[in-house]
Image (tube, helix red, strand yellow):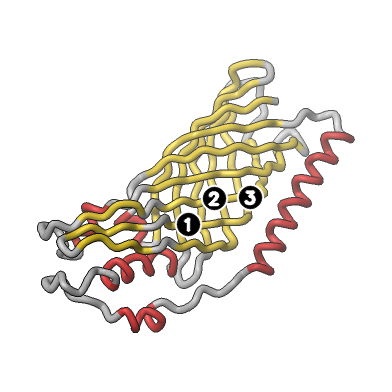
Amino acid sequence: MIALRGIYVRIVAYIPSDWKYIRITDINELDDILPKTKRKEDVMKKIIFGLFLLLANIANAFAQGTNKPEFYGNSGISFPIGPDEFSDYWRMGFNFGGGIGYPISPNFSLVGYFDFNNFRFDDDKYLRDYGFAGYGISISGGEASIITLSGNLKATLHTTTSSVHPYLWGGIGFFKLSIGDITIYGPGGAVSVEGDSESAFSVLVGGGIDFVIGERMDLFIEGKYVIGFTEGESTQMFPVKFGIKFR
């Protein structure tokens, strides 16, 4: 995965040469180490257009149907799953998001959803694993954020009068990974490493439970496995959400 792996190479490559106890990667080799990220603008445009059509269809259903729209809001925690660089050097983070849905039958709903996930770079673990600890080197910045915009099908497993409704969830959408700028401090001074970003197609699968607490309000807990098909290796995370739904 270019956006993540490139950060590791650059941290080593940009360490000042007067820090002689650290092996330096030749900066001129970076272009060979880091192949150029292919632009996926056409694919992204198609995904965004498809999501726009989904939301337009939901809005049209609102106008014509008797079912009521559903509005979602959530926050929670997110776990970095893969590739190894992501799960090893970024910590568990937080998420928040919201969406709008429309029931198309007693068991199925179409839902458009926006999610933001943030992960802090584990600089201490990175320095230990790469043998940089104990030399007066520190790292700041490097937070990873993932934004998803998705169209989803929600399948409620039963619609009895029970106040507990388990469900399954699946969708596709837009996925944007961003890595913040990193600053490296040490005996030779401070250097900055520019962050990176990449957009990709994504798939989301998961499930959860709705807890009915009123005529027009539910609480929900949900887990979702998200795969972004980023360059080289896919990026994976598992957000756990706690939220509220109005209908």
Tell me if mark 3 has few (under 14), some (14-19) or many (20+) residues whose alpha carbon lies within 10 angstroms of its own: many
Amino acid carrying mark 1 in the image: Ser
How many numbered marks appear? Answer: 3
Task: Determine contact: label 1, label 2, CB under 8 Å.
Answer: yes
Name the mark nearer the viewer: 3 or 1: 1
Q: In this view, does 61 lie above or below 203?
A: above
The label shown at residue 178 is 1
Residue visible at 34% across and 55% down?
A: 87
Structural distance between the alpha carbons of marks 1 and 2: 9 Å
Give residue 66's quadrant in the image: top right
Give residue 23's quadrant in the image: bottom left
Question: Is disc 3 placed on a helix, strand or loop?
Answer: strand
The residue nearer to you, when weighing 16 against 130, is 16
Residue visible at 39% across and 54% down?
A: 81
Residue marked by disc 3: 150
Q: Position of residue 234 (x, y in %)?
A: 47, 64
Query: Upstream in the sequence, badge 1 or badge 2?
Result: 2
Asked if residue 19 lies left or right of residue 73, the reply is left
Residue visible at 70% across and 37% down?
A: 101
Q: Is residue 27 above or below residue 214?
A: below
Structural distance between the alpha carbons of marks 3 and 1: 18 Å
Q: Is residue 23 above or below residue 157?
A: below
Q: Position of residue 242 (x, y in %)?
A: 49, 31
The residue nearer to you, when weighing 10 against 151, is 10
Asked if residue 57 lies left or right of residue 194, the reply is right
Structural distance between the alpha carbons of marks 2 and 3: 10 Å
Amino acid carrying mark 2 in the image: Ile
Amino acid carrying mark 3 in the image: Ser
Q: Which residue lies furthest to the front in this view?
A: 189
The residue nearer to you, when weighing 26 against 146, is 26
Tell me if mark 2 has few (under 14), some (14-19) or many (20+) residues whose alpha carbon lies within 10 angstroms of its own: some
The label shown at residue 147 is 2
